[in-house]
Structures are given as C-alpha cells and as structure tokens.
C-alpha cells in the first residue's frame, strides 16, 4: 500500500487538471496524456524517496 500525503494529492490533482485543460484547448489526446504520465512518475518518485 503506497502512502499518499495531502501535498502529493494536491499536486497530482493540479497535474490532472492541467491534462484536462490541455485536452480541452488542443483536442489532442497525445498532448493531454503527457501531464498524466508526469503525474504518475511524480507520485512514484515521491513514494520512493520516503
């Protein structure tokens, strides 16, 4: 079970919102996937460093 603190959730939420905004503005699925991938990598990195 991975531990997720409030700060990680906040940043992850912002990244997801960025992904949705990117999709709405560009209508490009490939561009909107990038923030999601970055968010997942961020969560993995922050969990490994603890």
Image (cartoon, grey):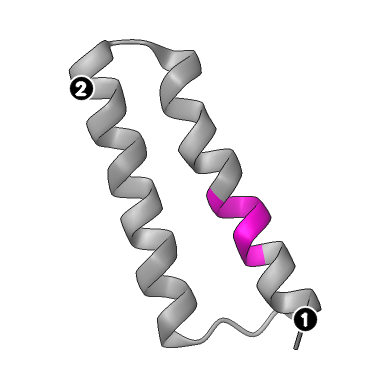
Residue at disc 1, secondary structure? loop
x and y percentages locating residue 47 in the rendered image? 72, 77
Q: CA distance from mark 2 to mark 1?
A: 34 Å
| Numbered disc 2: secondary structure | helix
Residue 23 x/y as whole percent: 30, 22
Is label 2 or label 1 in front?
1
Q: Which residue is mark 2?
A: 24
Quickly name the residue at label 1: 49
Left or right of 33: which side holds 15? left
| Image quadrant in which you'd find residue 9 | bottom left
29 drawn magenta = no
Identify the residue shown where x is 20% and y is 22%: 24
Residue 39 x %, y %: 54, 52
Magenta part, dominant SS: helix
| Range drawn in magenta | 39-43
Q: Residue furthest left?
A: 25
Say the numbered circle drawn on residue 14. Answer: none
């Amino acid at each position: 079970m991975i531990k997720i603190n409030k700060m990680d959730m906040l940043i992850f939420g912002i990244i997801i919102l960025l992904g949705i905004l990117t999709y709405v503005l560009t209508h490009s699925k490939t561009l909107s996937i990038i923030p999601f991938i970055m968010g997942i990598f961020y969560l993995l990195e922050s969990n490994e460093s603890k």
